[in-house]
Amino acid sequence: MIRTLVVEDDFRVGQIHAVCIERLDGFEVVGQSPTVADALTAVGETRADLLLLDIYLPDGTGLDVLRRLTRDRAEARPDAIMTTAARDVASIRAAMKLGAVGYLVKPFTLAALGERLTAYRELRQRMTAMDGSGQPDQSDVDALFSAARPAALPPVLAKGHSAPTLALVRDTVRSARRDLSAAEVAESTGVSRATAQRYLSYLVREGLASLELRYGSTGRPEHRYRAVT
């Protein structure tokens, strides 16, 4: 489980974010902190893995939290996804320099938050899988960096396409470390093969997946799909 601490001075907003987090597989909320001081204390008490971190706090900023944690516990510092109304370049640059793994500008949808958290979970899973397996090659490194960036769905879907199903198919392709057939995607997602084929073709048209043809002994090529990173 990814132990997540919500650092947000607006209690109502923090509660909404906490509920969203708890609904995702692999996450648990270990606390809510409304201030810099409380967040610093809570990190030690909860052993949080991830901070959902606002920048504007009553006694400082979320950036101050990252600076203090980097100074005092660099080896055990939790990761951070910034959730903030701050959209100035200085704040964004500072968050990047301090190692934030994501930056969501308010107001954002809960779907956007869920996508960012899911991408972070995938990143941790990939790193765990690679740990102790030897030196990763370039494709492995590329996969790690792309895992932290959720691939955006088209803002307007084509008629007859469901956003949840499209996201499910996309995430299945992205999480695989190899190319997949429509049948394999169908088995993983629970949709029919025809439905999987239709959504995979849509992802290819939108540039979110690539199509590869694999020729067998029969001469008829098999369609294989891989996420575009």
Image: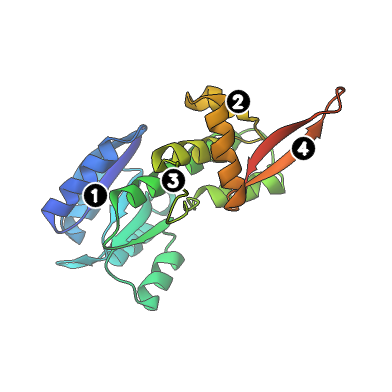
Instruction: Determine whether, in the image, residue 158 is placed left or right of residue 88.
Output: right
Reading the image, the residue beneath label 4 is 213
Query: Which numbered disc, 3 or 1, marks the residue that appears first in the sequence?
Result: 1
- First in sequence: mark 3 vs mark 4: 3
State the residue in front, 152 or 127: 152
Ranked by sequence position, the earlier of labels 2 and 3 is 3
Measured in 3D between alpha carbons, the distance from the residue under mark 2 to the one under mark 1, in whole angstroms, is: 37 Å
The disc, 4 or 2, on the residue closer to the chain's N-terminal end is 2
* Secondary element at image label 4: strand
Looking at the picture, how far across and down is residue 188, in whole percent? 52, 25
Q: Residue at x 60, y 36 (%)?
A: 130
Give the residue number, with chain letter if any, for mark 2: 184
From the viewer's perspective, is residue 176 above or below residue 4?
Answer: above
Q: Amino acid at mark 3?
A: Tyr
Question: Is residue 119 shown above or below 66?
Answer: above
The residue at which mark 3 appears reads as 120
Amino acid carrying mark 2 in the image: Glu
- Closest to the observer: 170 or 1? 170
**Cα–Cα span, label 3 and label 4:** 31 Å
Q: Residues within 10 Å of mark 4 (few under 14, many from 20)?
A: few
Residue labelled with disc 1: 6
Quarter where residue 174 is shown:
top right
